Image: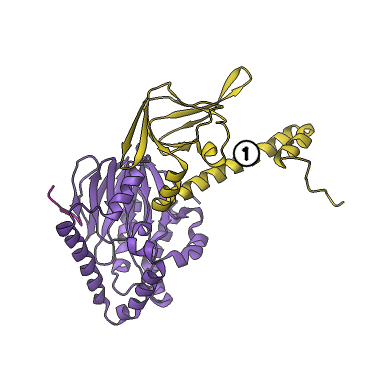
Amino acid sequence: MKLEVRCERMVVISDLHLGNPYSLAGRRLGEFIDHWAGQGYALCINGDGLEIVQSSFMALASDALGPLAALRRVLLAGAPVYYVVGNHDIALEHLLDTWLGEHISPFLDVWSGGARVRIEHGHLYDPFFVRSPRTYEALTRAVGPLLHLYPDVYRVWSWYQSTKARLRSLYAKDAVSPYHEAASMLLARGFDAVIFGHTHGAELLELDDGVYVNAGNWMRSSNFVRIDAGAISLHRWSDGHLLAGPTRGERNSMVDGQARGG
Amino acid sequence: MGYGLRDGDLHRDCEPGEVIVREGDTSREMYVIEHGRVQIEKRAGDDRVVLASLEKGDFFGEIALLGGGPRDATAVAVVPTRLLVIQAGGLLLRFRRDPTFAFEMVHKLSRRVSALNEKVVGLLEDRPEASDGVAQLLSFGPDRRLKDPT
């Protein structure tokens, strides 16, 4: 298992949830993979690439066909593909291991342009997941059949997450996000940037010791993180066009491609 | 040398050439390099042998923290270096809050054991006459090698 790699150029995507009825990733991902692999970028799927908790194997197999074919082209061309395991695809770890071998890991440390970047899904810092992992999984599974009947029910979860974040920023201004806190801990032990996924909310933030980025999701969005010789930027892949995010060192914060004040 | 507390973590800033821990010391803390470079050295007779050159993200001193006993090597800062200083209680708390650190430690220690095993095998192949002594060292006592049933 490779936990540390040297790589000057890499794109990182998170939370594709291929196979989930709500996810549109299967339609757009092939083009994205072909484009960046053609530019000489390594690819890292930062967890929850494949959906097994809320989906059937049949749905997964049909939805993942296009992206897996693109990944196969990339692998055959000799470009590196890394897969970091998340909480929705951990049951597939053995299967992925036979396909990706040493390129599948629970986290990945990337040396790029002298910078040390941690790529990790981030579910280990989700208070609910850590406090009650069984309840978390049971609830996640329970929503699965509902998603097949009415995929947009997923919007309720998205609304709940964004409302919770908004209320926290309104009423508990001093409360630190558990993901920012975890990123700070990692940055304090020799990392220059930390890339998480899991929350589905794309975000780039300068913390005291370095940069924190959340790679967002590909369910209805199409966010990705670019690593170029240690510089980190957040983008949205939309109809083949790039929406540039701030690069490392510009002291900016951004949520889902939109600049946020302060 | 300077110490500072930030967010409950103890940090230590070192000048180039500063000895962080000395071989034989009985201090127990381990260190993670936040930035800078550290050289690990060991006495060999009258000489000093450089065992490793460590950079940001690497850790050292964990043998004294986990196993006790005096330091088995000296660590020297090569350039201006900032270290995260961790004691046993702090390490346990860090494992709870930063579980991948535990995974990284075990991964690196496993690789070190694997590298040492390869060195031992290489030594035995180069110097078969040393096999008895090495076998005794590895079994921490009397010779417990498996006997060939033939």
Q: Is residue A247 left or right of residue B84?
A: left
A16 w.r.t. A173: above or below: below
The reply, left or right, for residue B66 in relation to residue A125 is right
Q: According to the rendering, which colour does chain A have?
A: purple
Q: Is residue A187 above or below residue A162?
A: above
Q: Where's residue A223, x and y in %?
A: 26, 57
Q: Position of residue A69 (x, y in %)?
A: 40, 64
Amino acid carrying mark 1 in the image: Leu
Name the colour assigned to chain B in the rendering: yellow
Residue reaching furthest bottom? A149
Label 1: which secondary element: helix
Per the rendered image, the range of residues in magenta is: A256-262
Residue A95, position in %: x, y? 50, 65
Tell me the subunit letter for badge 1. B
Q: Is residue A213 left or right of residue B131?
A: left
Residue A143's x, y, as percent? 33, 77
Where does label 1 land, which residue?
Answer: B116
Is residue A175 or residue B35 the one in the foreground?
A175
**Which image quarter: residue A71?**
bottom left
Can residue A79 be seen? no
Q: Residue at x 46, y 67 (%)?
A: A91
Say which residue appears at 43% left-offset and 60% top-offset. A72
Q: Closest to the observer: A46 or B10?
A: B10
Was residue A257 drawn as part of the magenta stretch in this picture?
yes
